[in-house]
Amino acid sequence: MSTVETMKDRGAEPMKILPRGHAALKASLAVSALTFLASCARDAPQDTWQPAGPNAEQIDNLQRPVFYVAGVVGVIVLVAIGWAIWRYRDRGQAIPEQTHGKPVVEVVLTVIPALILLGVAIPTAGSIFKLAKTSDTEMTINVTGQQWWWEYDYPAVGPNAEQYGITAPIVTSGQLVIPENTKVLLRVTSRDVIHSYWIPKLNGKKDSVPGRVHLLRLEGAKPGIYAGQCTEFCGLSHSYMRMEAVVLSRADYNAWVANQLEAYTSPAAGTLAAEGEGVFIQQCSRCHQVNGLLNAVGEPIISAPDQYMVSGAAPNLTNLMTRNTFAGASWDLLTPECREDVWKSDSATFGAKYLNGVTTDCLNQKDLREWLRNAPGKKPMYANPENLAATGGKYRGMPALGLTEDQINSIVAYLLERK
Amino acid sequence: MITTSSKLFYGLGTLSFVGALVWVVAHDGSSLGSIALIFLAVSLLFLGGIASYVRDGHVLSTDTTAHASAPAAQSASGNSWWPLASALSLGMVVVGLISSPGIFKIGVALSIAMFGEWMITNWSDRASADATYNDKVRGWVVHPLEIPIGGALLLTVIVLSFSRIMLSVSTGAGPIIFGVVGTVVLVGGSLVSVRRGVSKTLVGGACAVALVALTGVGLATALNGERHELVEAAEYDHYAVHPCGEEAEEYDEEASRAVSAKSSVAATVIFKDGELYAEMDGFPDPLTSISLQRSYDLTILFRNESVGEHRMILNYGNVVEDLGGGVTRDSKLQACTALIGEGGEQAIIVRIPKPSSASPQSPYNIVVSGVEDSSIEVLVP
């Protein structure tokens, strides 16, 4: 007995049911339309469909045809199901004869998917091998993840030194800086838990695993900033573990390297920055390294984050203001206007704007000061000194240092000169 | 009417509620234990409700025909060994409590399994009045667990036995045994698959004999111990950072704990024809200057491809110890391999705490003991 008949039998009014069905249909259409429209976003910095380098293009060239084929197959299947549901709906007819086995249909329905999968597998295997190639590497960078930031160190050996002028190790964090059209190989690893490195517009993701070195190719086709996000849940502030890859023209890259290798310059005596240097040595240098910083007797100050941090590392702040971000690229060092000016600039002017670094006018004072005032309040980091028994007294992030406003003022002035 | 089993559930449920209240009071407002107890109480009361509703599954006294035909009236299908196995498992728990945590844990696991089997068998024996159906229904419930777990246990026995044998025999005999056993399994399996007429009893018997033989030999070799190179390697603890004064003998390059360490080394240091150089993933050419990460557990593999025995030494600065009374001691930080013979290799794991710029007087480097004119510069940013 059909549903309609049942309702009629019971004296129910079908029209009361239908509007509810229409409402559900409308809601489904609205959700589908919104989902579809979301794919049209133009300002999507982590969009995998907008490749900006040959490795990402390799993936894009593979995923687009697969997506189209899957889409066509999906539509065919859904239409077939819909047609079967409509055509053979229950109208009170007798149950048809039940049959089993139709070799021709079964063979066709097995062979067609097998051929489709084969068609996908062959270019997929080719792409995997191309993306795993390392013999054409032109530059190598160590990428080390820890809760919740990325460290980049540029080894001063091999082609890095011979062709790119990296004559002494460069250590930075948050923003990876690479020359355009250069085959860069990242040696990705981790100091604590498993993270995953992903700049969607430049390549796929790669897990960073403690004790293992995983290789990831990266190449940017034109100058610009490309955003990324840790894609392996890695603890409390996983969502704050971001990264950016900055691609510079070769000339701009040489300028960046030269700037990174410049010797440390102390602030002029009697300035607020000089006062900040003292506060920095007292409060920050235990964990944060600033290359070239000397103590009162002229000896280099070497930070010891291994004594205070679970990961054994804290960001090197030697050239902090040459970057645009801080605290694991969670916040911008630039004000929104200055940031937009850099991000939206064209390839020709981008390098100059990026190399300009963070100026006094463009410094995002609000977030930086909030961070210095109470870092764990801004980014959860298991940094309560009363709850560190499990880690032997070591922190997983920057603790609240209890700095006074005067100390914060002086540290900000000091950091502004770190470029 | 409150039936017998529902009384038990209601009683336990009430006790759990009371326990939850006591927990809150006794643990200064801590909620975790009380949540668990309340959850338990709700579950027990739910079961009590079901027991009341079905009246414990009792047959009405007036329904005299059911007294013989009801499932509950059926006798068990046969003697059950599960009570005995459960008792032995509980005995193991007790022995484990006194002797070792490992035996205790195995006892607990076995107890859960044996009691579970006992409960299911008791239930399935009286699931219906049809003994054949009861046997089937038991299979539906426990075979999805029994078969994979039994298979995993069997596989564990095979792997453990075979690995004990391989760790016992010499490095020369190992590959031969591996090849012979693999060939026998492959040929035997192929013959059985081709000759479909072969009886299941024959195949089963042959597998059983092979399993018994493998387990017996595995047990014997386990009692006999690993080959002497592995014993020496384990005693030396070759992954620890040793004082570089003592020189241990060369040990087995295929040491049992070397596989994972070798699979992702930070750098491979090679000593060949009196020259020292390094290979690193990402650098296509041999390096005489390498960059290593700070505060990171680095695995460095040393391979001796020169004549004679050599050891690698990693110098990574110095440490000043406060001996008290204003006295300090300045010690070199070094990590060394054992003496490695020609063709041998060893991995060491070391964590470098400070950048190389911290030690301008004694630069970080890798050298080979006794070879002065060849070294690798180590940069630690």
Image (spheres, coloured by chain):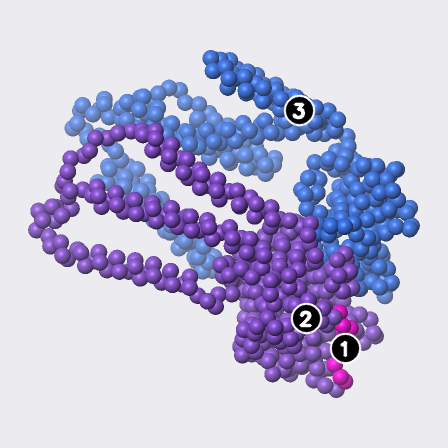
Q: Measured along the vertical axis of the image, is residue A295 above or below residue B359?
A: below
Report the side of B92 relative to B370 (left or right): left
Question: Which residue corresponds to mark 3?
Answer: B179
Label 2–label 3 contact, CB within 8 A: no
Q: Which mark is residue A265?
A: 1
Chain to which mark 1 belongs: A
Report x, y in % for residue A121.
Answer: 51, 42
To which quarter of the image does residue B29 belong? Answer: bottom left
Looking at this view, is B208 or A177 the one in front?
A: A177
Question: Which residue corresponds to mark 2?
Answer: A252
Range of residues picked out in magenta? A260-269
Residue occupying the point 51% across, 65% down = A45
* Kind of residue indicated by mark 1: Thr
Q: Secondary structure at mark 1?
A: loop
Q: Which chain is blue?
A: B
Looking at this view, is B192 or B147 the one in front?
A: B192
Tag 1: Cα neighbours inside 10 Å, few (<14), some, or many (≥20)? few
Label 3–label 1 contact, CB within 8 A: no
* Kind of residue indicated by mark 2: Asp
Residue occupying the point 67% across, 81% down = A413
Badges 1 and 2, same chain: yes
* Kind of residue indicated by mark 3: Gly
**Quadrant where the C terminus of chain A lies?**
bottom right
